[in-house]
Image: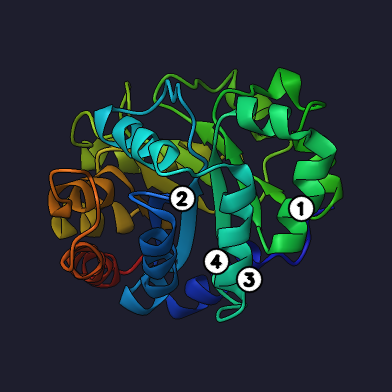
Amino acid sequence: MSSGTRIEARFADLKAQGRAAFVTFVTAGDPGYDTSLELLRALPGAGADIIELGMPFTDPMADGPAIQASSLRALNAGQNMIKTLQMVREFRTGDNDTPIVLMGYYNPIYIYGVDKFIADAKDAGVDGLIVVDLPPEEDHELCIPALEQGLNFIRLATPTTDDKRLPKVLTNTSGFVYYVSVTGITGSKAPDISQVNEAVSRIKRHTDLPVAVGFGVKTPEQASGIASGADGVVVGSALVNSIRESLDADDAATDSTVPNVLKLVSELAQGVRNTRGT
């Protein structure tokens, strides 16, 4: 199955160091292929331990306005699944250690062809998948075939995932569990740190997998608070907003795009590192 992936190795290493992982999300191809690849290559040096790379889609229903807009910018710039996998392949020429997780929706994968997608993703250097609109009841569609080829399949748990539902969610989950810290869409509101820590403890009673927390994390202080109880902190909308704020009137990158995002990544990474993770 999916033993010995980069994701598992990274979490094991960070656990030995006594700290949480900093997980960054950016959308592949936002605002254009070259800038997106430049940013992707620079994220580990700025402090990213794991990278989630969004697969652009026209209807990202779980995402808020920031990530929705990033998908549209990427699609308008010509991004597609072939280019997203190529981006991972190019990233791997200079970095064979940082885990890459493709995150998105099933439709683009289905259109590409499931078996071809799994084979091409594995060949490109992808380590795991997060597909937010495939419930456990549909594991035969993608989850099981992906696991059989050595890819981690990371599942979301939410504040409404109760103890009765949680074991089903965790059945074929591997790599880590992604806990959605707030109800609603990405970037919509700030997480309550005490409630998040309670939820992480509850999930850990059901699994030995690391638990990473995302949705709504924007500041180093929030990242530090979540890192005190979780195994990972995920930041997406804040980084995507940083990209958007740096663009010109035509949504094209400027000289400040990559430096601005990397500065924010560095600040957030410091927040994660300032607190001893579990």
- Residue 143 in which image quadrant: top right
Q: Distance between the residues labelled 3 and 1?
A: 22 Å
Q: Residue 230, can we see it?
A: no
Which residue is at a point 63% across and 54% down the rendered structure image? 85
Most foreground residue, 217 or 146: 146
Q: Which residue was labeled with disc 3?
A: 9
Identify the residue under disc 2.
Answer: 28
In the image: residue 142, left or right of residue 228 = right
Element at label 2: loop
Residue occupying the point 15% across, 55% down: 246
Q: How crowded is mark 3: few (under 14 residues within 10 Å), some or many (20 or more)?
A: some
Residue 223, given in percent of the width and then of the height, sits at 24, 55
What SS does tag 3 mark? Answer: helix
> Tag 2: residue type?
Ala
Q: Position of residue 183 (x, y in %)?
A: 32, 22
Q: Which of marks 3 and 2 is in front?
A: 2
**Percent x, y of residue 145:** 84, 39
Q: Does the residue at mark 4 contact the one at mark 2 (Cβ under 8 Å)?
A: no
80, above or below 100, in the image: above
Q: Earlier in the sequence, mark 4 or mark 2?
A: 4
Identify the disc placed on residue 120.
Answer: 1
**Residue drawn at x 54%, y 29% as measured from the top left:** 132
Q: Quadrant of residue 41?
A: bottom left
Alpha carbon distance from label 3 to label 2: 24 Å
Are dots 4 and 1 in contact, CB under 8 Å? no
Earlier in the chain: of badge 3 and badge 1, it is 3
Tag shown at residue 145: none
Is disc 1 surrounded by few (<14), some (14 to 19) or many (20+) residues within 10 Å?
Answer: some
